[in-house]
Every structure is written in structure tokens, then in C-alpha cells.
Image (tube, rainbow, N blue to C red):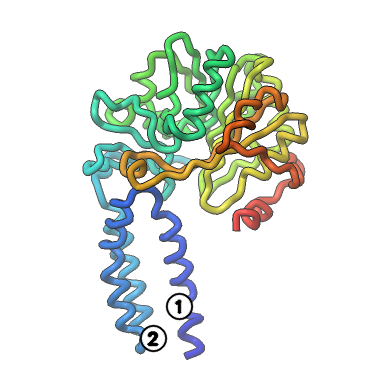
Amino acid sequence: DVIFPAAAAPLVVVLARLAAHLEWAPSALATRGLTFGPGLFLAVLMWPWPRRFITTIAAGLAAGTVASATAGQTLVVMRSFYGVHRVQDDDARQFHMLFDGSTIHGIQRVAADRRRDCVGYYSPGGPVGEAYAMLRREVRLRSIAVLGLGAGSLACYAEPGDRWTFFEIDPAVATLARTPAYFTYLSDSPAPSDVVIGDARLSLASQPNAAYDLIVVDVFSSDAIPVHLLTSEAFKVYLDRLAPRGRILFHTSNLYFNLRAPVGASAYSVGLSAVARRHDVDSDLAERGVFPSEWILVARTPEDLAFFVDAPEWRKVDAAFPPWTDDHSSLLSALTLRR
């Protein structure tokens, strides 16, 4: 009886991790329920017999994981030094989705007249849409740098006359984003865009000073945090490349880490101001391909964020956190804050 709960503990951890990845659509939750549910129900019946219980759980998880992974049609799988990327066709909702492991890095509607819809983490009603709309009214927003390409989703906000530059470390991601059979954000964009392959911080540092009206940092996933893009030294690079009234927009959605605190701390350490907004979605938005997300907007002065400070859903970022530097950072501290 003592050994049994201890033996079952790793299975509880696996179940918790699976639950954390049941991300965005009620229909997806239903699919996972049908996939994993019967095996788990059978396991409950086996509870009085520890060995049978553990065996049933293990078999159910294995079978459910295989079934879940093969749900929908896999269009392509590409392996690179940085990971395994998979494009999935969600035929029921008419989406293409880009996965890096279990994390969705991009989603696009398939219908020709809906391909430029801003969905996923970038919906018009979310922080990105509100920030773009406000900034376009307030300042000249023509030269835009995006650190992290994904499926090229942010190009849904491009307008004629813009100049977009995407910085992406993984050539495989760039190949997928540029292939119209998978994603067409870049090819459908009314504005030209460049994709620079290489480490985003080093590549951005090679660009001219004051070159960008907006810098978007969209490089963080649940499983890999490029800390060198969150340090005080990195923020100095961003600041130097930012036009006088430019802004920096950070995507900090994460299942495990609270990235709001280190982003705010590094921003304040170089004299910048920051506000954040969390966007939660209901079942209707989720079915339409909108994900919950969190974004942080950074500017040189509080006056440059005045509209967002007064908006009810935006909040000033707390500075009570030691800034990360190239010499010292702690992901554990961000993980503890998340909990």
C-alpha cells in the first residue's frame, strides 16, 4: 500500500503535464477526453489491484498519446538542430497549425478569403490588436522588426508601405513559413518582408540605430526560454535600434514561467516603462482559433504608454524583481513566480 502511491506518483505528473497542454478549443478538449477517458476510467476500476492499475494507466496513456498525436492530418514534419516542427491540418475547423513539440507556434485559416485573419495569439481583440491599432493612430508605424517568425502570423497586421523584418534562428521554421502549401501570411502580405536567419539578438545588433518604429519579441515557448533576449544588455540593443517614439512588444504567454517580472525588471533597469495585458478567451473565441495570451508593451517614457495605462485591461508591470543580466539570470525564480 505504501509502495503503490509512490509508484503511481510519476503517472500523476504525466497526467498533469498532459492537462497543461489541453490548450485552446473545447472541441480539442472533447477529443482528448474521448482519447484518454476510456483508458483512465478502466484504470479507476483497477484501483484495488496496484499492478493492474499501473499497467492500465501506462497502456492508456501510450495509446491515447499516439491517437492524439495522429488526430488530423500531418502535412509535414521537419527536424532541425533546434527541434521537431510539425504542420497539422485541423480539417474540422479549417486551420493549419505549426507545432514545435507540443507548443503551437502558429495557426492560419485555410479558406482563401480568411487567410489574413489575425488568429492564435494575435487576435484583433487581444493585446496585439489593441496595441497595433493604437500605435498606428498615434505614431508612424512603418518599419517593424519581429524576433521570432513562427508561421509569419504577425504579417496579418502588415499594411502597404510597411517594411517588415523577421529574425529567426531556425532555417526549418523559415522554410515552413515561406511555403504557401502550409502558410501564406508572408506571401499574402501587402508589404514586403525580409527573413534574417541567425540569433535574433546578434542579427538585430547589426542593424542601424533607430531603425524600427516597433520591435516585437515573440520567441518564448513553454519548453525553451532564450534568456539572453531578456537581459538588461539585450534591452540596450533593443533601445538603440528603436526610433525616438518607438515601442517594444513582448509576447510572454507561458504555461510554466512568469516572464512578466523579468521583462519588466530589465526594462526598468535601462530606464524604460512597461505595461501588460492578459487576454482570456471564451469558448466561442476558442473555436474560432483565438488563444489566450499575455503581452507586455515597453516604451521610453510613461507618457508614451499613457493610453494603455488608462485602459482598464492594461496594468503597469511590477518592478519588484532583480533584472536578469548576461552574467546572472535564474529561470527557477520565474518558475516559482508562475506557481
The image position of residue 77, as x and y in percent, is: 33, 42
Instruction: Give above or below for 69 relative to 99.
Output: below
Foreground: 65 or 134?
134
Does residue 310 appear left or right of residue 74 in this picture?
Answer: right
Task: Sort mark 2 into few (<14), some (14-19) or many (20+) by Cα contacts within 10 Å.
Answer: some
Looking at the rendered structure, which numbered label has been put on residue 50?
2
SS assignment at label 2: helix
x 36%, y 41%: residue: 285
Q: Amino acid at mark 2?
A: Pro
Residue contact at pointers 1 and 2, CB within 8 angstroms:
yes
Q: Amino acid at mark 1?
A: Ala
Quarter of the image for residue 114 reads top left
Looking at the rendered structure, which numbered label has been put on residue 8?
1
Does residue 58 appear anywhere in the picture? yes
x 52%, y 17%: residue: 136
Quarter of the image for residue 38 reads bottom left
The image position of residue 197, as x and y in percent, is: 51, 26
Instruction: Give above or below for 70 relative to 276.
Output: below
Instruction: Give above or below for 263 relative to 145.
Output: below
Does residue 333 appear left or right of residue 221 in this picture?
Answer: right
The image position of residue 86, as x and y in percent, is: 35, 42
The image position of residue 173, as x and y in percent, is: 43, 33
Q: Residue furthest bottom?
A: 1
x 62%, y 39%: residue: 315
